[in-house]
Image (spheres, rainbow, N blue to C red):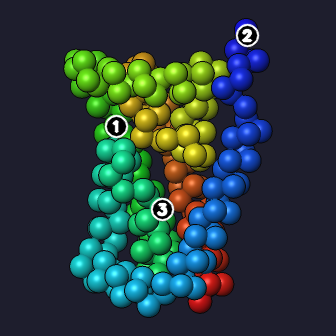
Amino acid sequence: MTKENDPSINLKRLIIQTVGSIVLVLVIVFGLAYFFRAELLGFSEHFVRIFGYLGLFFGMILSDSLPAFVPPDAFLVLAISGEMDPISTILSMSIGSIIGGSIAYWIGLYLIPRFHLGRQMVLHYEDKLLPYIRKYGFGAVVLSALTPIPYSWMAYTVGTFKMPFRLFLLGSLFRFVRVSVYFYAMYIGWITGG
C-alpha cells in the first residue's frame, strides 16, 4: 500500500473531526453556562484572583508537556467564565502551549530514547502519528497544532525522530490559531448559554 493510500491518513476525516470538536466544545460550554453558570462563575473567580494569566500560562505548559495533566480547553473555560481579556488569554495560553510542546520535544529528543518505558510510550502512539510525519513532515506538526491529533504526543514523537527544532517550532506557532478559534467558539457557547 502506498503512503498516499494509507487509510490511517484521511485529511477530510481529520477536518470533519476538527469541526466536530469545535462544535462539541461550543455545546459543552453552552450546557455549562446554562446549567452550572453560578458554580462555574464562583470557581473561575477564585482561579482568576489566585492564578490569573500566569496560571493559564503555566497550566498550558504543564498540559502540553505532560499529556493527561489537564485538557487545555479547561483553562479556556475558566478564562472565559472569569471574564479574562481575550487577547491576553490567547497570548498567555498559546505561548505556554508552545513552551510546553517544546519541553515535550526535548524530552522526546533526549530522555525518551534513554529509557525503556519512554520508548514503549512513544511506540504506543508512533503507529498513529508516524504516517502523518512520513506523509506531511513539518505539516504533521501543523496538523497536531490545529486538530485533535495530540500535540504533546506529536512533540514527543518528532523529538524522538530528530525533526529539526526550528521546524517543530514553526509548526507549533499554529497553536495561536487553535487557541483563538476554540476561545471564540467557547465564548459563543458561554454567552448564548447564559
Label 1: few (<14), some (14–19) or many (≥20) C-alpha neighbours in 10 Å:
many
- Mark linked to residue 2: 2
Q: Quadrant of residue 82?
A: bottom left
Label 3: few (<14), some (14–19) or many (≥20) C-alpha neighbours in 10 Å:
some
Q: Circle 3 sits in a helix, a strand or a loop, which is it? A: helix
Residue type at tag 2: Thr
Return the x and y of residue 34 as percentages of the image width and height.
Answer: 57, 85
Q: Circle 2 sits in a helix, a strand or a loop, which is it? A: loop
Return the x and y of residue 176 as percentages of the image width and height.
Answer: 53, 55
- Mark linked to residue 73: 3
- Mark linked to residue 25: none
Mark toward the viewer: 1 or 3: 3
Q: Do the residues labelled 1 and 2 touch (CB within 8 Å)?
A: no
Mark toward the viewer: 1 or 2: 2
Return the x and y of residue 157 as percentages of the image width and height.
Answer: 43, 27
Residue type at tag 3: Asp
Question: The N terminus lies in which quarter of the figure?
Answer: top right
